[in-house]
Amino acid sequence: MVIILKRTYNILFIFGFIILWANLTGCTPDTGESNYIERTVEVNDFSELIIYTGVKVNIRQSEQHRVVIRASEERINEISVDVDGETLHIKGEKTGLFSNTYTPVNVTVYTPHLTEVRHSGNHLVYSDDTLSFPSLTLISENYNSDYDNVGDFDLTIDNENLKIISNGISTFEIQGYTAQLEVSYYSGTGQFKGENLIAETVHVFHRGENSIKVYPVESLTGDLYSIGNLEAYHHPPLVDVEIHYTGQLIFID
């Protein structure tokens, strides 16, 4: 009898702690996809996108600007969508102290043009179709700003110019094609996985600690300032990479 009472007390204690923790941190557990609903938000024109904590964002190229939020009824209103000038801000209003352990709210962004995506969130930014915005900059860095630099990208690209800026732990997994690729890692342990991104010309500034993987066709130039390696999955006719520390240029057959 004592053992049963003790087990019951432990269960009640744990259950009560979970409720208290959720209230204190502002986290609302998801009730499952069967209870999901959608809310469409019509927005003004924008060319830049900033993503904050608590959302998983799918970027789709479309003829019109709009944002579709998909979540449980309890969480559908947690997300704020706002256009300030040329920038669309997508932000979770209450995501919890440990929001990366909770299911993110799914957001799909439809836009005919896009020049910059800054990822200041903690979940994935991805595309399920090929994005052909002519010139696109992807950013995950917090230098001189209050932005975070931990969220990951997984995008398929077909464009003229792609620029990557990072100084944190974000992973950029990019595939497809670009004519000009510029990768700048100023610090951190983040990765650039571009071995499946065919790029005519590649320029790299690498001061990070992890590997940058690229597929250069015509030229590969840049500087390596830290311990992170530069891995090239094709040997282009022109190679001009200066090594300043222990990071190495490695050609992968």
Image (spheres, helix red, strand yellow):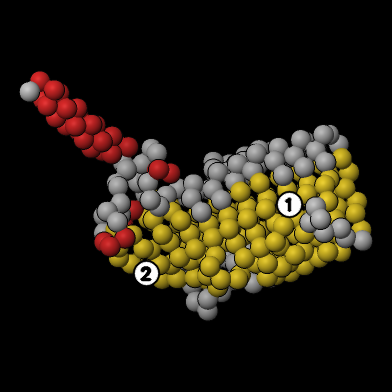
Label 1 to label 2, Cα distance in Å? 38 Å
Query: Where is residue 183 drawn, in percent x and y?
Result: 73, 52
Q: In the figure, is residue 41 to the left or right of 59?
A: left
Task: Assess disc 1: are there few (<14), some (14-19) or many (≥20) residues with their C-alpha within 10 Å of its C-alpha.
Answer: many
Q: Amino acid at mark 2?
A: Thr
Q: Does residue 85 appear anywhere in the picture?
A: no
Query: Where is residue 132 drawn, in percent x and y?
Result: 64, 72
Query: Where is residue 22 drawn, in percent x and y?
Result: 28, 39
**Is residue 45 depicted above or below 25 in this figure?**
below
Residue sitting nearer the eye, 115 or 19: 19
> Which label belongs to residue 111?
none
Residue under label 2: 40
Residue sitting nearer the eye, 62 or 86: 62
Furthest-left residue in this view? 1
Q: Which residue is at a point 33% across and 53% down the rendered structure image? A: 78
Q: Amino acid at mark 1?
A: Lys
Residue under label 1: 213
Q: In the figure, is residue 103 to the left or right of 64?
A: left
Query: Where is residue 237 drawn, in percent x and y?
Result: 92, 61
